Every structure is written in structure tokens, then in C-alpha cells.
Image: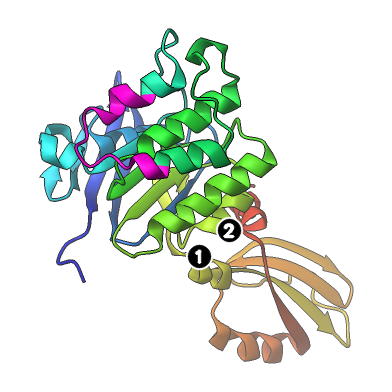
């Protein structure tokens, strides 16, 4: 068990030209965590990752990576981080093999066997010039460059946006392998909510410039649920269910999406309404959509 988290943020905020993008965001990332970052366009996902990486200074609060302020990260700590940006930073004139060679030269412990194996499995043509590669092939190459030195922290900003379904599955399997030993961590943003559901053990949801929800996936599924209410007599027109995000009533039946649901409230609510109540868990995509209605 490590004494401290790999990443720790407290009261983190960022503004551009006086306009707040993130405000009062706090979190930790422990070894072995696979964190999926969700949010609508403009929610601040990319800005959050850039703050963690030290690409931009915080306007408020702080974020530390391996115990160092991320904006002043020493070289040894930087070498423990892998990053895949939304837009690749590859050199068009190089072949894929040359691009790998350039990056590998900075890391004495570069894993040639891993990169060679993944290149073959992902069908990356190492002899092809980067400028002639498809968007999906460039993205695969960017991911290879981030994985080759076996980083302790892997940060990915929309890593599978340009990958076909087969390549996405191969990538997700590799990320699972990266995190399997419990000593490395992954933080990734994605608009493909099903991938986050499949991969992440922790979820961050950014909304209204803040960390709207964070925690393990099971807790989120237990917290935001759909209730099916069935009574023997018409339900009151003024029917209210505590913490309901959305409520639909139709005579003797009702359906409600409830946030902050507690199992111990089930019997009390059923007795209050004189009804049977069935609780249904939602998918992560359904939860995300309900929280953003």
C-alpha cells in the first residue's frame, strides 16, 4: 500500500481571461485506480487533465503529481507519466518506426517487446510515414508512444475517438492490463460512456465547472436509480418523491429517477404511498443523461 496518492488536487480552479472553467475541484488518484472522466462539451475535461499534467498553471488551489506541484514537475517525475492528447503531436515527415525511436531515446527502460507486440496486434505499419497514416492509425501510434515506457500514471484525453470498434476493444484490453498489477493508474476522458462503464472503477462527472460527482462506479449506480411505483388506488396529484430528478405519474403508477437513493428509504416510502416500489439500476449512460437534463 502506497503512503500517498499519485495525484492529489485541492480546491483546484482555472480561469481564462477572467472566465472560470473549473472551480473548487478536489480529488485523489491512488495506485491501481482507473478513472473515467465524463462531462458535456465545455465541461472542463481537457483543462482538468492539462492542470494535472502541469501544462497550464492553476488559477486557484493546487494539484500534485507524485508529491510535486504539477506545474513544476521534475524530470524524474515526468518520466513516470504517459499522455495521449486529443490531437496528436506526431512528426509528419518521420516513419512510425522513426517516431517510436525518437521517443524511446528519452527512456532508458523503453519496452521494445511491448511496443513491437502491440504494433503487430494493432496492425500499425511501422514503415509508413506518419503523414500518410489514417487518423485512426495516428491515434494508435500516439497510444503506443504513451505506453512504451510503462508509465506509473497514464493520462488520456479522448483516446479512442478515432478508433474502429475492433481497435477500441484491443485498446481497452491493454488498459486493463496496464492497471492489473495495482501499481499504476489511468485517468481518461471519453464521450463513449459505454467504454467508461466497461473500464473505469472510479467515475468523475464534471458539470457547471465543478466536480459534480466522484466515487466508485458501484456507488454511483446505487445512488441514481429508477423507481417504479404501483399502488392499488390512484396516487395523489401532488405526488412528491424526495430527491427526484424526474417524475412521471399515471393514475396508480409512477416512475421516478432519484438521486441519492438509500436502500433504507425503500420501505418507508412504500408505506407512505401505500404502494409497491421496485428499484431499477441504470446504465452509466442513462445516469449521465439524467444528471444533464
Q: Alpha carbon of mark 2 to alpha carbon of mark 1: how far?
A: 10 Å
Residue shown at the point (28%, 32%) measured from the top left: 14
Image quarter of the N terminus: bottom left
Residue shown at the point (39%, 58%) measured from the top left: 179
Which residue is nearer to you in this view: 125 or 22? 125
Q: Quadrant of residue 23?
A: top left
Sequence order check: which comes first, mark 2 or mark 1?
2
Residue shown at the point (57%, 68%) measured from the top left: 221
Can you identify the residue that label 1 sits on?
217
Evaluate whether residue 292 shows in this view.
no
Q: Is residue 102 left or right of residue 135?
A: left
| Crowd tier of the residue under label 2, counting other residues whose Cα lies within 10 Å: few below 14, some 14–19, many 20 or above | few
Q: Magenta span has 115?
A: no
Which residue is nearer to you in this view: 63 or 35? 35
Residue 271 position in % (x across, y down): 69, 92
Q: Which residues are magenta?
A: 100-114
Residue 189 position in % (x across, y down): 47, 42
Q: Is residue 255 above or below residue 266?
A: above
Amino acid at each position: 500500500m502506497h503512503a500517498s496518492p499519485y495525484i492529489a488536487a485541492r480546491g483546484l480552479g482555472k480561469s481564462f481571461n477572467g472566465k472560470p472553467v473549473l472551480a473548487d475541484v478536489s480529488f485523489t488518484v491512488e495506485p491501481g485506480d482507473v478513472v473515467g472522466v465524463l462531462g458535456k462539451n465545455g465541461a472542463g475535461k481537457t483543462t482538468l487533465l492539462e492542470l494535472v499534467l502541469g501544462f497550464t498553471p492553476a488559477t486557484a488551489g493546487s494539484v500534485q503529481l507524485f508529491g510535486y506541484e504539477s506545474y513544476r514537475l521534475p524530470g524524474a517525475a515526468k518520466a513516470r507519466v504517459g499522455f495521449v492528447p486529443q490531437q496528436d503531436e506526431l512528426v509528419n515527415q518521420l516513419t512510425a518506426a522513426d517516431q517510436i525511436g525518437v521517443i524511446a531515446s528519452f527512456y532508458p527502460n523503453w519496452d521494445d517487446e511491448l511496443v513491437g507486440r502491440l504494433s503487430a496486434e494493432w496492425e500499425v505499419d511501422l514503415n509508413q510515414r506518419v503523414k500518410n497514416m489514417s487518423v485512426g492509425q495516428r491515434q494508435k501510434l500516439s497510444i503506443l508512444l504513451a505506453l512504451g515506457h510503462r508509465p506509473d500514471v497514464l493520462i488520456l484525453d479522448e483516446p479512442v475517438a478515432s478508433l474502429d470498434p475492433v481497435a477500441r476493444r484491443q485498446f481497452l484490453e491493454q488498459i486493463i492490463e496496464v492497471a492489473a498489477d495495482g501499481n499504476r493508474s489511468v485517468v481518461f476522458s471519453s464521450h463513449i460512456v459505454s467504454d467508461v462503464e466497461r473500464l473505469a472503477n472510479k467515475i468523475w462527472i464534471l458539470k457547471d465547472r465543478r466536480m459534480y460527482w466522484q466515487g466508485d462506479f458501484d456507488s454511483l449506480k446505487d445512488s441514481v436509480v429508477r423507481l417504479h411505483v404501483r399502488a392499488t388506488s390512484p396516487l395523489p396529484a401532488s405526488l412528491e418523491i424526495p430527491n427526484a430528478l424526474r417524475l412521471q405519474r399515471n393514475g396508480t403508477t409512477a416512475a421516478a429517477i432519484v438521486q441519492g437513493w438509500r436502500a433504507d428509504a425503500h420501505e418507508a416510502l412504500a408505506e407512505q404511498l401505500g404502494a409497491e416500489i421496485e428499484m431499477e439500476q441504470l446504465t452509466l449512460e442513462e445516469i449521465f443523461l439524467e444528471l444533464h437534463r
